Image (cartoon, grey):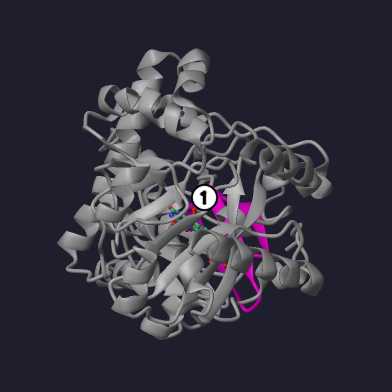
Amino acid sequence: MRRIYEPAAYQAPASCWWHDTVSPEPRPELHGEHRAEVAVIGGGFTGLNAALMLAQSGVQATVIDAEQPGWGASGRNGGFCCLGGAKLPASTIAKRHGEDARREWQAAERAAVEHVAALLRAYGIDADCHSTGETLLAHNAKSMRDIQRTAVNVTTEYGVTPHVFTAEDLPELGLNGAFHGGMTTPIGFALNPAKYHAGLHDAAMENGVQTFGQTPATALAQYGAGWRITTPRGTIVADRIILATNGYSSEDVPRWLRARYLPVQSSVIVTRPISTDAQSRQGWTSTQMCYDSRTLLHYFRLMPDGRFLFGMRGGLRATPKAEAALSRKIRADFHAMFREWHDVEITHEWSGLLCLMRSFMPFAGAVPDMPGVFAAMGYHGNGVAMGSYLGARLADTVLQRPQQGPLPAFLGTPPKRFPLGPMRRALLAPAYAAAALWDS
Ligand SMILES: Cc1cc2nc3c(=O)[nH]c(=O)nc-3n(C[C@H](O)[C@H](O)[C@H](O)COP(=O)(O)OP(=O)(O)OC[C@H]3O[C@@H](n4cnc5c(N)ncnc54)[C@H](O)[C@@H]3O)c2cc1C
């Protein structure tokens, strides 16, 4: 597999908190010849949701992962199950695709959150959920004015009433940091992504899905009316294939993917449990999941056990030097926003790859010129809900049945290539610099 970051970006996270909380049995490697109706490449939320839905409809689905199911972003994200998935503002979606498509997209965002909540309920998955909706905190006075102006859109677009509050309200809300107020939208919740993934994997297995670890697809070739996937120690002959590799995609498996996705690193730190005294000193006692209004945003939440999770964009490179610089930066940002916690020990720190698309919208649909091959990817850092949902919707597409939830047709438009080919992450440097200037 040819991929565009340094090898360190494709290694297991050094110290991920979620991995201390759940340790699923490793899945075996695929050996010999295997037959499947649908082969799913990638065992994260997208791939497992697709496979589970297929299995529930009586289709034999096999999932392979180059490492282990859940090894990618799905097992190491911030656990915000929330609205999102696009980087385009709603007004631009409406301009490009029409008002109906905009409405359908926002209905899909809501349905995505409900989809995950329903899965957790249906399979009795305890994923340490907390937080009622999601809170946006203004990092400067201008952002607070923007929030006040746009709060009304939340009601018209998502049919809920957000709670807008000022800086004076922050202590009472238990959200006392360097903010100018904010807004809570009562949609979404926080979860432990590894527990959600493990429960989803169990559910898929119980429904007859077969999963394999340490099984990278190294080549795809047409085989009769279907496809043949080559892996290091075996092959899968399948009628149809789903690509669910998102930020861990490669340039050559299949070649169609080349330059159509842009992996971006995101980084997270988790502290030791913060005592209730220290929480009170900072004035941050709420377990509400929050993000700030910067373009290069921070996302953070106090977890039910008192640990604090804090995440932000990762480095442009995955070299030891870049990683050390990022480690200093994430600590500096954390301490600047939570001054009382400068001496709180940071016990876990890791990075992972999310995925941007040139259209700034996800893709979920058929791969052109590869009959029977489908893909879903590009959730712009919001794939807990949207990746799960689009995986399930892609199963509907594969089954050629009516969609079981809202899905705007334009998500099926094949993604265009980014400029600069394998060098395309160079596009991020000026984008980050401009965003940092804008945020200051
Ligand atoms: C640090 C971080 C924090 C994030 N926080 C949030 C958040 O709080 N909320 C949110 O909504 N989203 C968040 N995201 C994004 C979210 O995690 C992803 O959008 C989502 O998990 C994508 O799921 P996926 O199944 O499509 O891909 P992944 O979970 O990345 O899975 C892709 C899998 O494909 C496998 N693979 C790749 N190539 C091959 C091959 N050739 N053969 C076999 N297997 C292959 C990989 O090993 C990998 O396991 C975050 C991402 C990161 C990195």
Quarter of the image with the C terminus is top right
The structure residue drawn at horizontal position 48% and vertical position 31%, both measured from the top left corner, is 411
Disc 1 target residue: 381
The percent position of residue 310, horizontal first and vertical second, equals 49, 64
Residue 388 in view, yes or no = no
Q: Is residue 140 above or below residue 58?
A: above
| Quadrant (top left, top right, bottom left, bottom right) of the N terminus | bottom right
**Depth order, front residue of 108/203:** 108
| Rendered position, 92 above or below 372 | above
Q: Which amino acid, mark 1?
A: Gly
Residue located 81% across and 43% down the image: 421
Task: Specify the quadrant of the image occupied by residue 301.
Answer: bottom left
Helix, strand, or loop for circle 1? Answer: loop
Dominant secondary-structure state across the stretch colored magenta = strand
Which is more toward the observer, 303 or 365?
Answer: 303
State the image quarter where residue 164 is shown.
top left
Q: Position of residue 99 (x, y in %)?
A: 39, 14
* Residue 353 location (% of width, % of height): 60, 59
Which portion, as a residue range, is magenta?
Answer: 217-241
Question: Is 425 left, or right, of 53 in this rendering?
Answer: right
Asked whether mark 1 lies closer than 8 Å to ligand 1, one says yes
Q: Is residue 230 magenta?
A: yes
